Amino acid sequence: MSDSNELTVDEYLEIRYEVQIYLQSKIHKESPSLFDELDEENKKIVSDYAKSIYEKSKLLEPSISSDLASLLEPNISQFASFSNRLKTMEGLKRKIISDSKDYNGSYYRATHNICDSIRYTILIPDDFYVTKVDEYLHRIEDMGYQVLEVKNNWGKPYYQGINVRIGTLDKKEIFELQFHTPFGYQIKEGSTRDLYEVVRDINAPANLARQADKLRRIFQSRVKAPNGAIGYEYDSTMKRRY
């Protein structure tokens, strides 16, 4: 495969075919999860931590969802993947185990640094994107939430969008809010999700993982940044009129 940022039709079709064959293979489907590889004592520890986060998130989610829904405007903004706003127990267990590597193996520290047990995606068309992202973040703070971190991924490799960490009204928990354009979201979820499954699978053949990763980057490079999106920074002190 060429090292350029282009693929021939035959190269593209070959990667897609090999990705689908691998995702249907016994190696992928029966590969033990990170949780399955733990002993019984650590399974219980991780399960208890995951359950505590999940139960707390279930209590917090309805009021957060209601507040964020009040931002949405017909023909301008909408939720995407709203049914996935709560990370599943399996997802939480996987994240706790994976993130613990960054905390010297501490499941406790990994658990208390999870920020996306509640997560949302809002889609905004290109023409309104930067204006509405800025407006919505200000309105979220006006509700009493805290905008803690705004990570702007526009112009960088992989998915194109803005990822925000937000503190809850009681200042004790954090949830995640992503802003995408409709086309960018379609690329992320519709065109590259299966590629990501291969890339993150530690049992995938190294060459296939590299090819899948390259194809992911090519797809994402086709997502045009809305005017002003690259380099956008949120400033809570700069109030807009809306």
Image (cartoon, rainbow, N blue to C red):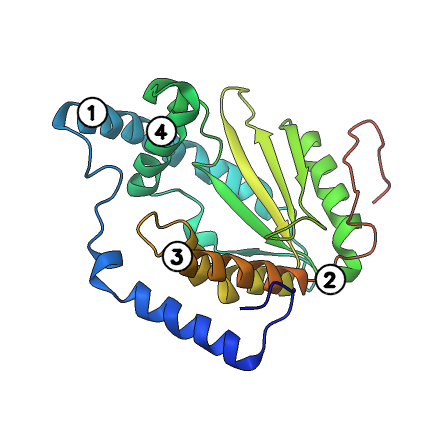
Disc 3 versus disc 2: nearer the observer: 3
User: Observer-nearest residue: 214 or 195?
Assistant: 214
Distance between the alpha carbons at the discs numbered 1 and 2: 45 Å
Disc 1 versus disc 4: nearer the observer: 1
Graded by Cα atoms within 10 Å as few (under 14), some (14 to 19) or many (20 or more), the crowding at tag 4 reads: some
Q: Which mark is first along the chain, 4 or 2?
A: 4
Q: Which mark is first along the chain, 2 or 3?
A: 3
Marks 3 and 4 in Cβ contact (< 8 Å): no
Residue at horizontal 75 percent and vertical 54 percent from the top? 129
Q: Which residue is mark 1?
A: 42
Q: Which mark is first along the chain, 4 or 1?
A: 1
Distance between the alpha carbons at the discs numbered 1 and 4: 17 Å
Graded by Cα atoms within 10 Å as few (under 14), some (14 to 19) or many (20 or more), the crowding at tag 3 reads: many
Q: Is residue 34 left or right of residue 109?
A: left
The answer to whether residue 143 shows anywhere in this view is no
Hey, what amino acid is under mark 4? Ile
Marks 2 and 4 in Cβ contact (< 8 Å): no
Q: Is residue 174 left or right of residue 142?
A: left
Q: Position of residue 55 (x, y in %)?
A: 32, 31
Q: Secondary structure at mark 1?
A: helix
Q: Secondary structure at mark 3?
A: helix
Distance between the alpha carbons at the discs numbered 3 and 2: 25 Å
Q: Which residue is mark 4?
A: 53
Q: Secondary structure at mark 4?
A: helix
Hey, what amino acid is under mark 2? Lys
Q: Position of residue 154 (x, y in %)?
A: 70, 49
Q: Which residue is mark 3?
A: 198
Distance between the alpha carbons at the discs numbered 3 and 1: 27 Å
Q: Is residue 81 above or below residue 52?
A: below
Q: Secondary structure at mark 2?
A: loop
Can you tell which mark lies on residue 224?
2
Hey, what amino acid is under mark 1? Asn
